[in-house]
Amino acid sequence: MTTPPLNQAPGYRPTVQRGGTVSACELLNQPVEDMNGKPMGHLEDIIVEVDRGMIAYVIVGCEEGQRCALPYELIRIEREPLRLCVRVGQEIFRPGVQVHGEP
């Protein structure tokens, strides 16, 4: 039997560190909501721009297995409860969005 990742363990509660930092691992699988609080999906991945060493995109898993790449500047991380809010509405989610490196 394999042990689930920490952020998927029953009863796991992520903690925001002092200074407003949080581990990327703790953000994975957290809920993503639109600016009105409507669920949009969950965070699947974080894409880093290597040259600048900064987050470029977040990958959000949506209904029916769709995935959407959203520019990081559209994301706001909230602390209590830990979740991600998108500064746009549901219209940004379109079927067939291709994630870099996928067919």
Image (tube, rainbow, N blue to C red):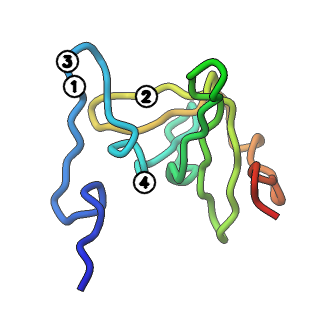
Q: Are marks 3 and 1 in contact (CB under 8 Å)?
A: yes
Q: Nearer the viewer, mark 2 or mark 3?
A: 3
Q: Distance between the residues labelled 3 and 1?
A: 4 Å
* Label 4 vs 2, first from the N-terminus: 4
Residue placed at 52% from the left, 49% from the top? Answer: 39
Q: Which of 13 and 81 is in front in this view?
A: 13
Expressed as whole percent of the image width and height from the top left, the position of residue 56 reads 65, 29
Residue placed at 66% from the left, 22% from the top? Answer: 51
Q: Do the residues labelled 1 and 2 touch (CB within 8 Å)?
A: no
Locate residue 46: give its quadrant.
top right
Q: Residue furthest left?
A: 11
Q: Distance between the residues labelled 1 and 2?
A: 13 Å
| Residue identified by numbered label 2 | 77
Question: Would you say 43 lies left or right of 102 here?
Answer: left
Expressed as whole percent of the image width and height from the top left, the position of residue 83 reads 40, 39
Expressed as whole percent of the image width and height from the top left, the position of residue 17 reads 22, 25
Residue placed at 38% from the left, 28% from the top? Answer: 78
| Residue identified by numbered label 4 | 29
- Type of the residue with mark 1: Gln
Q: Distance between the residues labelled 2 and 3?
A: 15 Å
Locate residue 62: give its quadrant.
bottom right
Disc 4 packing (10 Å; few <14; some 14–19; many ≥20): some
The relative height of residue 15 versus residue 31 in the rendered view (above or below) is above
Q: Which of 50 and 24 is in front in this view?
A: 50
Expressed as whole percent of the image width and height from the top left, the position of residue 24 reads 40, 39
Q: Nearer the viewer, mark 1 or mark 2?
A: 1
Disc number placed over residue 18 in the picture, else none: 3
| Residue identified by numbered label 1 | 17
